[in-house]
Image: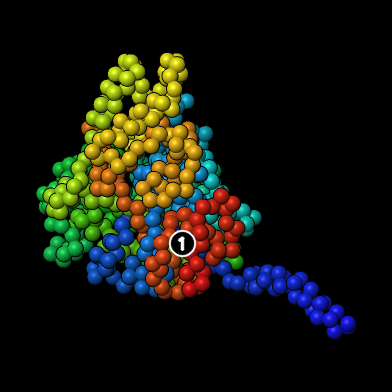
Amino acid sequence: MKGNFVVLLAFVATLIYKPVFAQDVLNEQVQPKVVIGIVVENMRTDYIQRFWNKFQEGGFKKLYSEGAVCTNVKLTLHTQNYASGTATLFTGVHPSIHGIVNNTWYDRLKKKETDCTEDDYYMTVGADSEKGNASPRQLLSNTITNSLKILTQGKARIFSVALNRESAIFSAGHAADGAYWFDIESGRMISSSFYISSFPDWVRLFNSENYAARYSYRNWVPLLPEIDYTEALRDDYLFESGYFGQYNTFPHTISKYLKETNDFRPFKTTPSANLMIKDFALQLLDNENIGQDEVTDFVSVVFSSMDYENGSFGPASLEMMDSYLYLDQYLAELVDGVEKRYGKNQVLFFLTSNTSASYPVAYLKNEFHMPVDEFNVERAIALLTLYLNNTYGDANWIEHYSDLQVFLDHDLIKKKGLGLNDIREGASNFINQFEGVQLSMPAQQLEQGSSANGLLEPLYTSYYKNRSGDFLYLLKEGWQPTYKFKKINYCDQSHIPLLFYGHNIKHQIITQKYSAIDLVPTLSQILHVPVPDKCQGKIIEEIINP
């Protein structure tokens, strides 16, 4: 009897002891001093393979040769854009939950398009412009950076650096110590009073270097002799539209392009803009006390792939390849600078993208005879208007249209005593008949929610009531929407790069299918941060248990 009691006591003691021991082990695990999140806008996964032989050793090659590389990751969105993409990456949920359905959306109450980060309650810090009147208020979900800040009781230092405001704000989150982005009006790096009350002296000093003005008056010339760009099209390729539809060959006189836009927007399309981001990030590490204690800090650095001119040149262009050869150098300098500051095993890097990139229609049609074309949005809307007028009577039934969705006039429909869902379905079915449309779905079906995979998934994961239209539609693969007077950077490709490098990361190639929403739970596991309650992703187990 006594022996049985001893065994029972030992068993109970084991039950009590194990959780304590597990907690002790957890506390003893060394956390990285810093997380460096590298995001490249409009980056295709095949750029690495195509440009590999031209990359140097310390940039992309180092990250891909020594890191854990996920080769099959998708970012599922109705329309690819860096606002929705960044929000999805850093929240671990789709736009149907976090609410950022695009860079802009139609506000029915205000009767106008609203920017996803615009917030006039806050003011620009760092320049005399309104480009800093912004906040993450419209982001309705928790970010990994928020979770880290909360868990450490505010001790973790959280910052972001980007060319575009949306990328900076949504990678920083709500609780960050600072988010900085490029102001096309002043040519400076700026922020919002949401994050900082007074502009740091070191940023003021950085802006005094006048990167945008200085580098805009230097022609953009290729890094290598043109003959070495064997992985790209000829510089004078016939179907490459180029800057403003006419300047498509090197050297690119950026100072002349500035006169076309009357701001520094063309500077954002050049390698020099990524150089500025790299230099700013390194100075931020030194001036904001990053990695100086036992609490993990988090810095997001967002680079660009030619920004708004991405589609004017395309993935096969010499300009795009040259951009990545320059970026490869800057990544090498960033990684080397970070490792020298903290040590390789003290830093966790991840590299991904918030959007991919599509080949231009002209290139696919003329070079490969693919069954693709341009979808004239305005013509489709004009025909839809005729259909609605013939069916329900002459009136302005369409209140707004953009981003492959249509907003009907709800007040008018109610006044006429008609059924909203009936008109939604009729209009959706009409658009569904166009040659370039893959499928169209009315809002009432999307509001019911679905876990559908495949073709319907982008519609269900991107629809958010009161921010999305009355019906959404998808184009067939390779088709591109066009407008008469509006230029858009459209992409229908969903595969994005994702790799981890540094702190306790072993080199491996992971071919299992994963999603962009899996980044947050994986980072949470590595950093021992609670996974956000509404997170829709799963842990990439190969990273945790290589």
The quadrant where residue 316 appears: bottom left
Number of numbered discs visible in the structure rendering:
1
Rendering quarter of residue 24 = bottom right
The residue lying toward the viewer, choosing from 328 and 201, is 328
How was this image coloured? rainbow
| Residue at left offset 48%, top offset 68% | 543
Task: Say few, some or many: other residues with alpha carbon within 10 Å of mark 1 (under 14 / 14 to 19 / 20 or more).
Answer: many
**Residue drawn where x is 31% and y is 15% of the image:** 394
Above or below, 78 against 290 in this view is above
As helix, strand or loop, the secondary structure at mark 1 comes to: strand
Residue visible at 65% across and 73% down in the picture:
25
Q: Residue furthest bottom?
A: 3
- Residue 7 at least partly seen: yes
Amino acid under disc 1: Ile
Horizontal side, residue 122 vs residue 351: left or right: right
List x then y, in percent, for residue 62.
Answer: 36, 71
- State which quadrant residue 379 falls in: top left
Report x, y in % for residue 207.
Answer: 39, 49
Position of 390 relative to 1 (above/below): above
- For residue 223, above or below residue 396: below
Depth check, front residue: 402 or 14: 14
Per the image, the residue denoted by label 1 is 36
Residue 111 visible within the image: no
Q: Position of residue 190 (x, y in %)?
A: 43, 45
Tell me where residue 450 appears, x and y as whole percent: 47, 45
Quarter of the image where the N terminus is located: bottom right
Residue shown at 47% from the left, 48% from the top = 451
Q: Nearer the viewer, residue 261 or 425?
A: 425
